[in-house]
Image: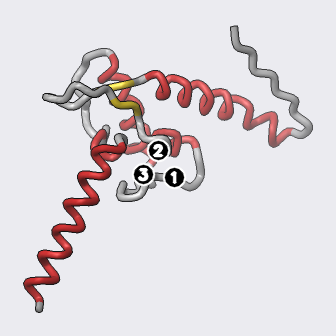
């Protein structure tokens, strides 16, 4: 059994209490989610920089190579669609799983680097 105890000393922190609870609960749920790509045997968890939490924060933090999404609706849709996927339902849109796994980010960065090198070679 886990217990969260919060002591609020002013009204501002009192208003932030539900947000802090939501951050903790969403972080805990995302920590339990693992997935694997089609054709692979290895299960993988979300990237340690949990960009899904950016829905409830002022400035989103994302892993290197992932796009920064500031649109509130898109961030909310990403959370909803991750939970839809956990239930086996199709995503509506905006889940961007390719930016939530470390292995996918590495592949995207390698592809971007190769594209820049090819473009540089063409210009010279």
Q: Are marks 3 and 2 in contact (CB under 8 Å)?
A: no
Which scheme is used to colour this image of the protein? Answer: secondary structure
Q: Is residue 34 above or below residue 122?
A: above
| Label 2 CA crowd tier, 10 Å (few <14, some 14–19, many 20+) | many
Nearer the observer: mark 3 or 2; the answer is 2
What x and y, as percent, mark residue 35?
31, 26
Query: What number is the disc on residue 2?
Result: none
Under tag 1, what secondary structure?
A: loop
Q: Earlier in the sequence, mark 3 or mark 2?
A: 2
In the current view of this chain or complex, which residue is farthest to the bottom? Answer: 124
Answer left or right for 41 relative to 12: left
Residue pointed to by mark 1: 60
* Mark 3 vs mark 2, CA separation in Å: 13 Å
Q: Is residue 123 above or below residue 82?
A: below
Under tag 2, what secondary structure?
A: helix
In front here: 41 or 9?
41
Q: Are marks 1 and 2 in contact (CB under 8 Å)?
A: yes
Q: Quadrant of residue 7?
A: top right
Q: Earlier in the sequence, mark 3 or mark 1?
A: 1
Residue pointed to by mark 3: 71
What x and y, as percent, mark residue 85?
30, 23
Q: Is residue 96 above or below residue 30?
A: below
| Label 1 CA crowd tier, 10 Å (few <14, some 14–19, many 20+) | some
* Mark 3 vs mark 1, CA separation in Å: 10 Å
Residue pointed to by mark 2: 51
Under tag 3, what secondary structure?
A: loop
What x and y, as percent, mark residue 40?
19, 29
Answer left or right for 9 relative to 52: right
């Amino acid at each position: 059994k886990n217990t969260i105890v919060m002591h609020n000393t002013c009204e501002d922190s009192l208003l932030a209490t539900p947000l802090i609870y939501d951050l903790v609960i969403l972080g805990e749920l995302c920590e339990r989610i693992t997935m694997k790509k089609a054709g692979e045997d290895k299960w993988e968890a979300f990237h340690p920089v949990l960009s899904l939490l950016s829905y409830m924060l002022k400035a989103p933090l994302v892993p290197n190579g992932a796009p920064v999404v500031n649109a509130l609706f898109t961030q909310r849709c990403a959370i909803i669609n991750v939970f839809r996927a956990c239930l086996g339902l199709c995503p509506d849109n905006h889940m961007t799983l390719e930016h939530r796994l470390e292995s996918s980010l590495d592949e995207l960065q390698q592809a971007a680097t190769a594209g820049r090198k090819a473009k540089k070679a063409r210009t010279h």
